[in-house]
Amino acid sequence: MSETKKLPELFGSLVFNEETMKERLSSASYGAWKRCVTEGTSLDISTANEIAEAMKQWAVEKGATHYTHWFQPMTGVTAEKHDSFIAPAGGGKIMMEFSGKELVRGEPDASSFPSGGLRATFEARGYTAWDPTSFAFIKEGSLCIPTIFCSYSGEALDKKTPLLRSMDEVSRQAIRILRLFGDTETKRVTAQVGPEQEYFLIDKALYAKREDLRMTGRTLFGAKPPRGQELEDHYFGAIRPRVAAYMKDLDETLWALGVLSKTKHNEVAPSQHEMAPIYSDANTACDQNQLAMEIMKKVADRHGLVCLLHEKPFAGVNGSGKHDNWSLGTDTGKNLFKPGSTPSQNAQFLLFLAAFIKGVDDYQDFLRATVAFPGNDHRLGAQEAPPAVISIFLGDELTAVVDAIIQGTEYQDSGKRTLKIGVDSLPAIRQDNTDRNRTSPMAFTGNKFEFRMPGSSMSISGPNIALNTIMAEELEQFADELEKSKDFQADLQKLIRRVFTEHQRIIFNGNGYDDAWLKEAEKRGLYNLPSTAEALPMYTTKKNMDLFVKHGIYTKEEINARAEIHIENYTTVISIEAKTMVDMIRHEILPAVSSYADQLCQRAYHKDAQGVPCKYETATAKEIGKLTDALASACEKLERDLTKTPADPKKAMTYSHDVLIPDMDKAREAADQLETMTASDYWPFPTYADLLFSV
Ligand code: ADP
Ligand code: MG
């Protein structure tokens, strides 16, 4: 990135954004695009042609030679197929060409993207279509056009299409509620998302020496280092120069791409950091988070580093998540989760809060399923925050309000004022940092909810599709009820009270980490789904299917396809990990510990011959021998069990979880013990201490 560019000039310089469109399009075409985005009208081909031409000219001026329809297949990563702009111009010359047709619709050869059986039953190929609500941008000489990806018969093969559908649906239902409160202005309600992204940075040369990191993104072996995160001095600590240089480069690269990267700081674990952008509409936030993850890896490479996005690269050290901050905002600039300053605004806030609480309670199992991913199993339900049980943290002040409503009593705020809900104004519910509960999976933080369960490597589309749809459903139920009411004020109070009463079990302000909470949660009848194998089946229960089909977010086939892909992915990931483990044991660990034991035996033999004491060598060699045999037999068992993996995808998932993971744990235990006993010169790859304190 150019050092001389000033930030305002740099920001968005590689984005074909609204300002650029205004500058480069006729006012008729700009107006047509704007209406398309705000009112959902369609674009005619002549407008598309003009936009394509302007886009191409702009991109070529910036040095682009190719264009690509950039999309998000169901794998959770992004995909692109690059075509160059060139077309023959006669006389051996070329011209740069890009038409409206090419902008609006592309046809990648998509036969190798997972479709969960969708394409087999419908069409063999899919098509991509421009999403005019997300700006095009230039990445590595290519004009990237954010697109949706569908089969010819219209089934969504991607993560963007259902997200856009869910955004429309929650907007529609939220507006019905706003009208009841006399709001006649709001035309659109937008789901707002700010994803905080955690990551690890390690040295590239060390990374290259670990097959497990290269193959699986995480360490499959590694004894606990003498120093981990106990000192807690890393969190918000001073950023080391090499990391600072990386962060600066990352920021500048992201800024040029229009990503509002705002916060950067160290995280709890050594080598762990966080990048948070300023929130935007959910669609842009999802696109930009995918882009940010890609850029984070590429920038690391330029700095001799590797950026690990895996949820748990190191055992015994905090894992990485992605906090999904979510709220609803109106096109008139109001945040619907912000407690208001008048009694009527407060009542409206409480109604949206009630919808959220009811929705999370009704669909806990589905929300849990959206973050079910093998890497995330090492965080959720594994002695790490947040737990696998879903609950909502409201903080003391808001909980007191909710309790007062349930009990029908008056509420006393911290200033000892007595307030009547719906009559007096609520106090500003502060986002108090001392009051922060970091163990809650879903925390209210003043004017938004922070969903802390998504894993660091995952697309945030799934969780946001779920939040939008759940919210749409509850708002619809409320609107159906209240639109019929003859006494709105009275029925509103009744509804809020009823919902809080019926769903208070989902509210929990204590330590989510505590075993006592798991027992309490069970008593309350909340779901505890500690692993992906247990959570994924929730995707396709009747209640959950009905919700998404009813709101037109997924068809039955689309939801089945997604469940199928996640189920197969689970088995694939575990099997790759198991095979990598076997490989490292056979080719690296066993030969290393065997030759070290050999060396000890020789020493003992020679020392003994000369009458020199050799108790240490003999005892160590014996212990290493025992552990080596244990490791070898654990490895054999893992290899044997791998071959017995059932063919049926659901059975294979359960089998991987119940059989292969315990096998791997056993092998790791022996290997990690061996690591602590083996001379450094003999140990075949970098240790945790090497990796975690390398940068
Ligand atoms: P934290 O203390 O958790 O780091 P921040 O205030 O830094 O909290 O916000 C975290 C993320 O939440 C940022 O990406 C921020 O832009 C986003 N955010 C703030 N307000 C909202 C909102 N109303 N809706 C959605 N996201 C928001
Ligand atoms: Mg946060």
Image: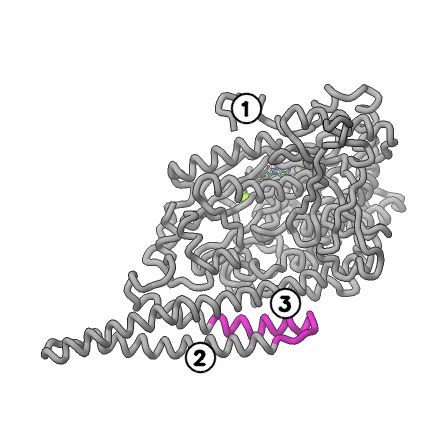
At mark 2, the secondary structure is: helix
Label 1 crowding class (10 Å Cα cut-off): few <14, some 14-19, many 20+?
Answer: few
Image point (77%, 44%), residue name: 128
Three-letter amino acid code at the position of disc 1? Leu
Image point (52%, 63%), residue name: 382
- Location of residue 273 in the rendering, given as x and y in whole percent from the top left corner: 47, 44
Which residue in the structure is indicated by mark 3?
Answer: 533
- Location of residue 543 in the rendering, given as x and y in whole percent from the top left corner: 78, 62
Three-letter amino acid code at the position of disc 3? Ala
Q: Earlier in the sequence, mark 3 or mark 1?
A: 1
Label 2 crowding class (10 Å Cα cut-off): few <14, some 14-19, many 20+?
Answer: some
Q: Residue furthest front?
A: 91
At mark 1, the secondary structure is: helix
At mark 3, the secondary structure is: helix
Residue 393 seen by the camera: no
Which residue in the structure is indicated by mark 1?
Answer: 7
Q: CA distance from mark 3 to mark 1?
A: 46 Å
Three-letter amino acid code at the position of disc 2? Ser
Q: How is the image coloured?
A: one colour
Q: What segment carries the magenta color?
A: 645-665
Q: Residue furthest left?
A: 611
- Location of residue 164 in the rendering, given as x and y in whole percent from the top left corner: 76, 43
Q: Count the marks: how many?
A: 3
Which residue in the structure is indicated by mark 2?
Answer: 633
Of residues 395 and 661, which is closer to you in this image? 661
Does the magenta stretch mainly form a helix, a strand or a loop? helix
530 up-or-down from 462: above or below: below
Q: CA distance from mark 1 to mark 2?
A: 59 Å
